[in-house]
Image (cartoon, rainbow, N blue to C red):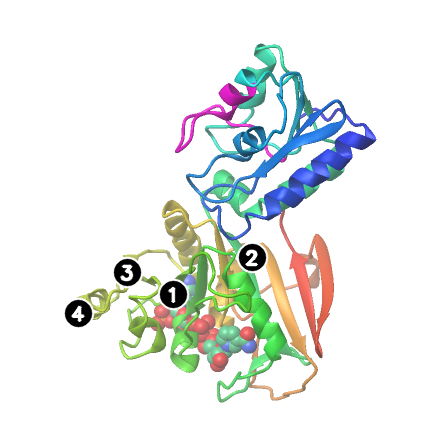
Amino acid sequence: MTQTLATQSDAVHLERTLELAARGRGRTSPNPLVGAVVVKQGRPIGEGFHSEPGSPHAELAALADCLEDPDGATLYVSLEPCAHHGRTPPCVDAILAAGIRRVVVASDDPSAKANGRGPELLRAEGVEVEWADAEPAHAARLLNQPFRKHARTGRPLVLLKSALTLDGKVATPAGDSRWISSEASRARVHARRAEVDAVVVGIGTAVADDPLLTARPESGEPARQPRRVVFDSHARLPLNGALARSADKAPVLVLCSPAAPAPAREALAAAGVEVLQTEGADEAARVGEALSALGARGIQSLLLEGGPRLAGAFLDAGEIDEMLAFVAPVLAGGGEARSVLEGRGVESIADARRALAVAVERIGDDTCICARFREW
Ligand SMILES: NC(=O)c1ccc[n+]([C@@H]2O[C@H](COP(=O)([O-])OP(=O)(O)OC[C@H]3O[C@@H](n4cnc5c(N)ncnc54)[C@H](OP(=O)(O)O)[C@@H]3O)[C@@H](O)[C@H]2O)c1
């Protein structure tokens, strides 16, 4: 894609579209985060963002917000405008009807129905269309990593979360892990759960910790609860556990294999748990199959909360996109204690996955490391 642009004011208005887009975080899936600003004679006259599926797209919201006639104005938008009918009419029609003269787009939409069609149509109608420079374009792509990975691969973006000791352990040999990280770190995890489509654990963790896995952020009840997913080949999820018992309050999905006994599946289904069968030659292959199955159900992002065996299988499958590590200043020791990732791993450090970008934050006494391994 050609990069043109950009004046200083273009950069300022594009940055504003990203701020606006971020306001929809945790509420727009399966749609992307999008923000838009209408600028006339150098002044913003309207702005908007996409707030939830079925609500107006950002471009329409910005045009509706205009305090004066947008005829002849420039529209800044963080994602290319759509040309297709979805739950709402095509944005290009509204842009043309409003008399917008120039459109500045921060990032492309890689989904099959978009993929440059909107900008092409606008150009064909005589609207000047420009693409953002590398930096705002990159920032705009980062906003929509779940949407972009799902559009390109049909699979959700995987964010691995782990609470570990300073010596890299996530549980003692006896399986105890409560609580390695601080209350403030755990509050952060609840906020992240509220932003993703699914929270995932292996059956080992479901049995050892009996977690509830709902999002309980400090900011109050989230817009929606993530789907709680358990990788559980034999449908062993306890019916009297926290997950199965709360299936009527927030959805629970068990991913089992053909080896799961029919009575166990039926008992889970009767308890309100959705049971889905996936296959695969080994654990890593089963991760890939499971991600495709989750993606086919519209799940675009997931928070993988362990444990080590399942997370290791995700790494072996090449499916960890980002990691959020809460490192607590405690030492556990023990050769048999569990580390973050098991699975096959790599033979030489030259083959180890190296992060593309890392951010570090102190949360109380813990150190939170956020590492990005892939960009979509
Ligand atoms: N500190 C932390 O952040 C943290 C987070 C989570 C857990 N933990 C600790 O970790 C321990 C549990 O971890 P774990 O490794 O024993 O269990 P796990 O990773 O939670 O679950 C592993 C099990 O998942 C099932 N599974 C289904 N599909 C799989 C696939 N494709 N790949 C791999 N496994 C698959 C397997 O059982 P089936 O063959 O029966 O399906 C496997 O034994 C607990 O002690 C818990 O407290 C710590």
The chief SS type of the magenta part is: loop
N-term mark: 2 or 3? 3
Residue under label 2, please give it.
320
For the residues marked 4 and 1, what is the alpha-carbon distance in whole angstroms?
18 Å
Residue under label 4, please give it.
263
**In the image, farthest residue toward the right:** 8
- Dot 4 amino acid type: Pro
Looking at the rendered image, the disc whose residue lies closer to the viewer, 4 or 3, is 3
Residue under label 1, please give it.
231
- Dot 2 amino acid type: Ile
- Dot 1 amino acid type: Phe
User: Is-magenta flag for residue 93?
Assistant: yes
| Quarter of the view holding residue 64 | top right
Looking at the rendered image, the disc whose residue lies closer to the viewer, 1 or 3, is 3
User: Is-magenta flag for residue 59?
Assistant: no
For the residues marked 2 and 3, what is the alpha-carbon distance in whole angstroms?
25 Å
Observer-nearest residue: 271 or 110?
271
**Mark 4 residue element:** helix
Q: Is mark 3 within 8 Å of ligand 1?
A: no
For the residues marked 2 and 4, what is the alpha-carbon distance in whole angstroms?
34 Å
Asked if disc 2 and disc 4 are in contact, CB closer than 8 Å, the reply is: no
Q: Is residue 54 visible?
A: yes
- Give the image location of residue 213, x and y in percent: 44, 70
Q: Is residue 36 visible?
A: no
- Give the image location of residue 48, x and y in percent: 58, 37
For the residues marked 1 and 3, what is the alpha-carbon distance in whole angstroms?
12 Å
Q: Is residue 60 above or below residue 367?
A: above
Observer-nearest residue: 44 or 172?
44
| Lateral position of residue 28 relative to residue 17, left or right | left
